[in-house]
Image (cartoon, grey):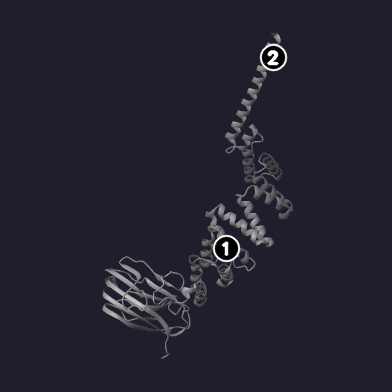
Amino acid sequence: MRLQSRQRIVAAAVITCIAVLLAWRVLTLGLADHWQSSDPERALRWREDHPVALLNALDAALRQPADAKTIKALALSALQASPLNGRPYRVLAQLREAEDGIEAALPLYNAAVHRGPRDRFTHARLFDYGLQTGDVAKALGHFDFLLRLRPQTASTLLPVLVTLAAEPAVQPALAAKLSDSPPWRAQFLRLLAQTASDSGAVEPLWQLLRTGAGGGLPQAELQPWLDRLLRDGQGDRAYLVWVSQLGQRELTELGNVYNGDFELAPSGFGFDWRFGRVPGARIDRMPVTGASGNLALRVAFDDRRVPFAHVQQVLALPPGMWRLQGRARADALRSERGLVWQVNCHAGGAPLGRSEPLRGQRSWHAFALAFEVPAQGCSAQVLRLLLPARIPAERRIGGQAWYDGLAISRAPTP
């Protein structure tokens, strides 16, 4: 009996010790968890191998003027506690780079980005290294990661890529990356078209994108480049780029005025028709008796004031004398000023020419407009249907106007 009693006492003592140890373990772990973010050093006093507290202590040491030896010790401890975390590798890589250079630190940086793919510093450092060593494709991979991790940094990072895009050595790899359709592609291409210091330097990149294996560029992404060429006075280059994107059916409508019979739906892209929207007017293509084909342009007005200038097409006519001709019809078109076709240089300035106004009731009839494209500053032009009101009262218009068979041809020099 005495032996059994002693055994029970020993067992109870062992259980009590285990319970105390477990309670102490739970207490220290709880306190360490409590202080892991706000005071990591205090957390480590309760549990020296607490993985989160070690990482936070490491970050705190990096923010303070701590010596390299202390930082390295913390990094090694954090690595031992969290072997799958990339931050300790990145810190060790930074320390190694400071001592022996980037080449010696590269394995640690690679381990850091492998275990911590969301670490922005490591991606940025490897991006720089890839550019320095000429491994542009790998550098752009890290750049892509940076933008995917924090899309809000695009306004800071994309201008860097705009500068690089002018480098011939960068363009093939950049075109390949863009052909993969990263989520920042459209924003980058718009920024490139708007802000590149030299459009000629980045034109090979656009050429690679238009003809590469990625299937070319959609109209919305190519339009900013066409706008840039037009802004630079390169209307002929812009026109050639636009023509290269047309399909077989669209090519049949080519002319100095594209789709002048309005048989194709306007795309609003490049040198195609652009139909805008304005309250009080409706612009469409409809069947009508007397049209040269199946459809004609119709503009209907609601007998109210309309600042109308919402049918237009960009042209690329060489310098010289030209003649616009077409057919028109008016159905109770009530307007003091009437509708006119007007040609301007794309860069602005006074009109090159304006047709006779259309108003009242008129059956189908021919109209014409002679104009001259100057030799300088007018590489592209704009053909626009508008209401030439001088004051708000003259904007009132009602009824319908129809147009068909628009074409431009060379005119004899007077």
Q: Circle 1 sits in a helix, a strand or a loop, which is it?
A: helix
Question: Which residue in the protein does label 2 denote?
Answer: 7
- Rendering coords of residue 21 (x, y %): 65, 25
Looking at numbered disc 2 in the image, what kind of residue is underneath it? Gln
Q: Residue at x 53, y 64 (%)?
A: 189
Looking at numbered disc 1 in the image, what kind of residue is underneath it? Ser
Question: Which residue in the protein does label 1 denote?
Answer: 179
Q: Residue at x 65, y 67 (%)?
A: 169
Q: Nearer the viewer, residue 14 or 378?
A: 14
Q: For residue 370, what is the image quadrant?
A: bottom left
- Rendering coords of residue 161 (x, y %): 58, 62
Compared with 65, 217 (above or below) is: below
Q: Residues within 10 Å of mark 2 (few under 14, many from 20)?
A: few
Compared with 15, 48 (above or below) is: below
Q: CA distance from mark 2 to mark 1?
A: 77 Å
- Rendering coords of residue 364 (x, y %): 30, 80
Q: Is residue 272 left or right of residue 281?
A: right
Compared with 98, 301 (above or below) is: below
Residue 389 in sight in this render = no
Residue 312 in sight in this render = yes
The quarter of the image holding the C terminus is: bottom left
- Rendering coords of residue 110 (x, y %): 68, 51
Q: For residue 266, what is the image quadrant?
A: bottom left
Q: Residues within 10 Å of mark 1 (few under 14, many from 20)?
A: some
